[in-house]
Image (cartoon, coloured by chain):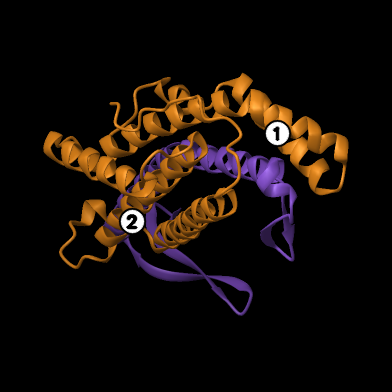
Chain colours: A purple, B orange
Amino acid sequence: MALEQRNGSLYYYRSERVGGRVRKVYLGSGRLAELSAEAERVERERREADREREHAELERLESLAAPVLEIDEAADILARAHLIAAGCHRHKGEWRRARGEARNS
Amino acid sequence: MPEAKPGTLERYQLPADVQERLDELRDLSEKAEAGDKDARRQLKQAVRESAPEVIARASDVSRRAQHMLIETAAGGSELAQYALSGRLDVMREEIAGDNPTPLEVLLTEQVVSGWLWLTLLDALNSAQFWKRAPSEVRVSPSYVRYMVKLQESAHRRFLSSVQALARVRKLQSGTPAVQHNTQVNILAR
């Protein structure tokens, strides 16, 4: 949305995209235009503040998730290493104990 | 959610030397799985020598991370914090069972952490779908979609950790444990 000043008067327009083209829609002039522009500014600032709050919240969530993911990865590596060291192997994605070796490893 | 103090997140990360040993174990596991007999021999030795300490330290980091999640989930309420800690202790005892091996202790910590993380996400997401939620806690639809994806991923990982513990128990039952002389006190605070 934009305020335009011509010949000392204020005119308020909104840009709309219609069929791939941008066109200006006239919304009012004078005091009404100023109020509309002000309302739009306040709304834009509120949306921006919301975005910032969500961004901060996401960063906080990711920092909380990081240790959980790290432990997940460590546990996966250690479990796999133990199973292989104990003679187990994967067959078509399923872990199996190798005949003979597992109980004696 | 309450903010973490600056620098405190480092306490919840695995130390560099532990990470190095994990990398070594992963490399050896990959080679051993590919049929490298020498790598399998080295892996057995690495599991015998370094895995118990790595497991103990990873379990320790996991416990600290759980504490951070508890503080967040409790939202400043000491009673909620105490109740959640107690709940996790009960879970740990039930899941780890009697005389767990160090690996079982770590996998138990993984299950407990996964449950806690999933519960926290459940609570955060539920708030968004509560009709009477105040407008200041409402977030945009794109944020809710992201949160739901996080929740789904946490749910998958939680189920996978339960499966991993069951698998290790099943496959290691009857096999001589690699080394059981590292004690991790699962009730320590």
Please tell me whether residue A66 is drawn above or below residue B146 in the rendered image.
above
Q: Amino acid at mark 1?
A: Leu
Please tell me whether residue B28 is drawn above or below residue B158 in the rendered image.
above
On the rendered structure, is A105 left or right of B9?
right
Q: Chain of mark 1?
A: B
Quarter of the image that includes the C terminus of chain B: top left
Q: Amino acid at mark 2?
A: Val
Q: Is residue A1 visible?
A: no
Residue A64 at what x, y percent from top left? 41, 38
On the rendered structure, is B63 left or right of B33?
left
Say which element carries label 1.
helix
Q: How many marks?
A: 2
Residue B25 got which mark?
Answer: 1
Q: Residues within 10 Å of mark 1 (few under 14, many from 20)?
A: many
Q: Nearer the viewer, residue B109 or B176?
A: B176
Q: Nearer the viewer, residue A31 or B79?
A: B79
Residue A54 at what x, y percent from top left? 39, 47
Say which element carries label 2.
loop
Distance between mark 1 and mark 2 Cα atoms: 42 Å
Task: Tell me the quarter of the picture where residue B37 sits.
Answer: top right
Q: Chain of mark 2?
A: B
Picture residue at 70% right of the left edge, 40% below the top: A105
> Which residue is label 2 attached to?
B139
Q: Are marks 1 and 2 on the same chain?
A: yes
Residue A56 at what x, y percent from top left? 40, 39
Q: Nearer the viewer, residue B112 or A11?
A: B112
Please tell me whether residue A14 is drawn above or below residue B92 in the rendered image.
below
Picture residue at 44% right of the left edge, 22% below the top: B11
